[in-house]
Structure formats: C-alpha cells, structure tokens
Image (spheres, helix red, strand yellow):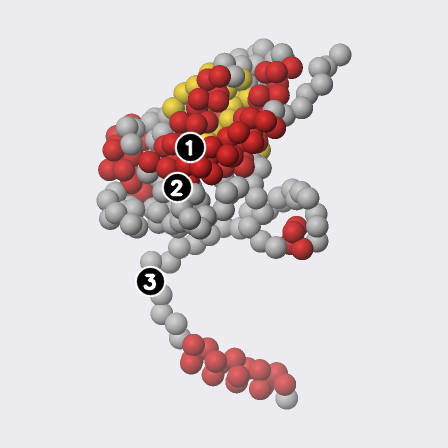
Amino acid sequence: MHPNLTPDLALADRLFAALRARGFDGVGITRPAYGPGEQAAHDLCRAEAEALGLEIATDPAGNLLMTLPGTDRAAPRLLLGSHLDSVAQGGEFDGAAGVLAGLAVLGGLVRAGFAPRADITVLAIRAEEAGAWFPTSYPGSRAALGRLPEEALAVPRLDTGRSLAAHMREAGFDPDAVRAGAHLLPPEGIAAYLELHIEQGPVLDSQEIPLGIVTGIPGSRRLRAGRVLALLWARCCRLSWARSAR
Ligand SMILES: [Zn+2]
C-alpha cells in the first residue's frame, strides 16, 4: 500500500516568506537575472533541497537541479520547476511558485519515505524573464538543454549594458562551457516536464476556476525595428471595406 503522499506545504510557506523578505522592493518582487537577488533565491532553494537530502547539481549556466533519486536511475526523469528571476516590481508567485511547488512535492515524498521509479528533478531556471533583463528568449532553458546559440551570450542586459556571458561569469558560472554546448539535461533523459505557473491573465480568476491546464503555448517574435504605416493601412481598409459594403 502506498503511503499517504501529500506535499510539504510548510516548506513552501517557509520559502515564500524567505523569498518575499529577500526580494521585496517596496512595491513588488525584483530579482534581476544573474543578479544577487536571483542568486539568493537559488541559495534558499538549494539549502532546503540539501536539508531534504536531494542530489544537487548546477549546470554551466547556473541552472540548479535538485533530484530525488528513483529506483531506476537509468529511467528518463520527470522534471518539475520554473524560473527564479523576476521582472522589476513583479509578482510573488511568478516563477517561484513552480520551483517551490516542485520542492514541496519532493518534500512530501521524502517525508513519506517514498522512492519513485524514475528520478524526479526540480529545476530552478536562470534568466527566464528575457524581456526584462536580456532581450533574448529563454537563455536559461536553452542553456539547460545545450541549445543556447552563441549570439545570445553577447546580448547586453538592459540595465547594465553588459553581456549575458559577462553576467554569467561574474555570478560564478561558465559561459565558455555554455558556448560549447555543455549541459546536464540531454532531452532523451527527460520523460516529462511539468511547470506550475501563475496565470498571467484574468480568465481563471474572473471565472473562479482554481486551476487550468495549458493546451498550447503562443510563440513570441521580437522585432528589432519596425515602421508603422497606419495611414496607408487605414486607407486600404476603408477602401476595401467600402467596396465590400456595396
Ligand atoms: Zn514566469
């Protein structure tokens, strides 16, 4: 019979309080990517993971892997997690909720003495708020999979003007290894990835639905330059509308 498996909610409460105390800027939460606030959040999560006896690893980009070993170490692992950086004056739950939920789950499994069949890894990802700090998409996730293109390492952080590689190095990590594609998460070793994330729109809240399951993800496209031809557009549309209305 399986033990009663419940997440360690006290662990999540404790970590949320610690993150709030460290990251509150007077309005919201601010944890710049590869800044001291993000590092402090990683340190807090790492300390909890060590207390649980999880295996800890950090990849060359500084992504943190906290693993409860499975009974079959060769089986593809289950990944849980999210990011720990935030936008300026961001919300308390964005990113952090996914990492803390994963740790609460593993805390519950450890407490129950339950060994899963495959490894379960909580991943705390670096630098996911690309639009706020480094204007390139998801450098932490891509580096975790060994897929960060070289040019992304040269992208400057918006507030300091210094490159992603420089910030990575300053934080104690290894952009040269990232450039060479070194990583700890080969895709064939991943069975599934589950990310709990706060909804960033009003739908669930307005309809009082506690939980939604994402069935699709929109791509994002960043344009470096653009021209707005509004007058031309307006004339065209008026013309075609006028024609179709006849
Ligand atoms: Zn997020």
Residue found at x 63% / y 44%? 215
In the rendered structure, which amino acid carries the disc numbered 1? Ala
First in residue order: circle 2 vs circle 3:
2
- Residue 159 image offset from top left, x and y in percent: 29, 50
State which quarter of the image contains the C terminus. Answer: bottom right
Q: Name the front one of labels 2 and 3.
A: 2
Secondary structure category for the residue under label 2: loop
Foreground pick, 28 / 49: 28
- Residue 220 image offset from top left, x and y in percent: 46, 52
Label 2 near label 1: C-beta < 8 Å?
A: yes
State which quarter of the image contains the N terminus. Answer: top right
- Which residue is identified by label 2? 31
Is 151 located above or below residue 6 in the figure? below
The answer to which image quadrant residue 10 occupies is: top right
Q: Is residue 6 left or right of residue 157?
A: right
- Which residue is identified by label 3? 225
Q: CA distance from mark 2 to mark 3?
A: 28 Å
Foreground pick, 155 / 232: 155
